[in-house]
Amino acid sequence: MRPGLIDGFGREITYLRVSVTDRCNLRCSYCMAGEVSFSPRRDVLTIEELEFLTSAFIACGIRKVRITGGEPLVRKGVMHLFQGLSRHLKSGILDELCMTTNGILLAKYASGLAECGVRRLNVSLDTLDRDRFAEITSGGDIDLVLKGIDAARDAGMAVKLNAVAQKGYIERDAEALVQFAQDRHLDITFIETMPLGEVKSNCADHYLPLGELRQLIERRWRLSDTDESTGGPARYVRVDDTGGRIGFITALSHCFCESCNRLRLSATGALYTCLGHEDFTDFRAIIRQQGNVTSLEEAIHSAVAAKPKSHDFGTSPGREPALKRQMSVLGG
Ligand code: SAM
Ligand code: SF4
């Protein structure tokens, strides 16, 4: 029996998000600034280091791993990481291996991911309008994402859509997105914009409390509250007519920290125990300088013990702290 990871506030930590690159093949306005600087390659963990470190977290009690980015599928060798980690699914020590992707390269990798035991994927899609998609992502081709979603479903994976609710955009797109999800029996989650990084699109200008978005969706569908959870911060409602599920991630208007079960590892080996704090533990230094499993496990337990009680984004957009780290460093 593994001892498990319990933080200083009694929360059991079972979920690790691993960013495998801070690079991306898109430039979403709320995520990456015009001039983006990426980590030098020597600072980025190798696929072997990522697998070693992730496996150490699993040995300490992590039961769910999500691979993210930047865009995870642009990382060379990422399928070797999935193949390596899939052994923990087979042994039963890991419950779930999943990924968040923008879907651009998904058609190519879907069947390989399914073979590695990936059962669920989050695909980011903020609009179904071709031109608005290109505008939000700085030139992305929505057809590739739609093909990726089809390929993932054909390979037997459950796809959940993630849409960032940007005021001035989502009002026009929410209805079509919800319809698209209902037609395909997909979950869809709307995410409030979070103030991370110095990005092109100012979070305060595009901040829409999701309560307002819900009212907008309710003009067309009847929604019922549920207490369902997928182990994440989303609150879910059911669409009465279709039985479909819509999630709302309200990072700013409702704090969900009391039930936080997650850790985030950057591609350079920095472990963040909270998305809303700058403090991190440098696991690259620990594995490159020491490489000793006992000290690694000790470092994991002490980082978890020091996990902050709550993010400090503030509850109103006017009180945002200027966190310099972009979302693409940790992948949400
Ligand atoms: N590239 C992949 C993707 O887009 O799905 C994975 C990384 S991306 C950083 C992870 C998620 O963070 C995406 O769903 C994206 O929409 C969301 N995201 C990025 N910047 C955000 C922001 N400022 N506020 C809220 N969500 C954001
Ligand atoms: Fe890339 Fe994802 Fe950020 Fe968009 S949200 S720029 S796809 S990392």
Image (cartoon, rainbow, N blue to C red):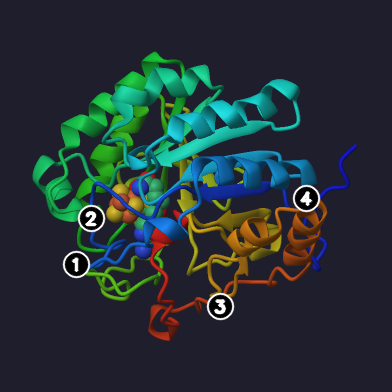
Q: Amino acid at mark 1?
A: Gly
Which element carries disc 4, helix, strand or loop?
helix
**Residue 179 quadrant:** top left
Q: Amino acid at mark 2?
A: Arg
Q: Which residue is mark 1?
A: 34
What's the mark number on residue 180? none
Q: Is residue 230 visible?
A: no
Q: Earlier in the sequence, mark 2 or mark 3?
A: 2
Q: Check mark 1 vs ligand 2: CB closer than 8 Å? yes or no.
A: no
The amino acid on which the numbered mark 4 sits, given as a three-letter code, is Val
Question: In the rendered image, which residue does mark 3 sit on?
Answer: 312
User: Residue at horizontal 35%, vertical 31%?
Assistant: 181
Residue placed furthest toward the bottom = 319
Mark 1 touches mark 2? (CB < 8 Å): yes
Which residue corresponds to mark 4? 293
Element type at mark 1: loop
Name the residue located 31 percent from the left edge and 35 percent from the top edge: 103
- Who's the residue at 73% across and 53% down the image? 13
- Residue 7: x %, y % from top left: 79, 63
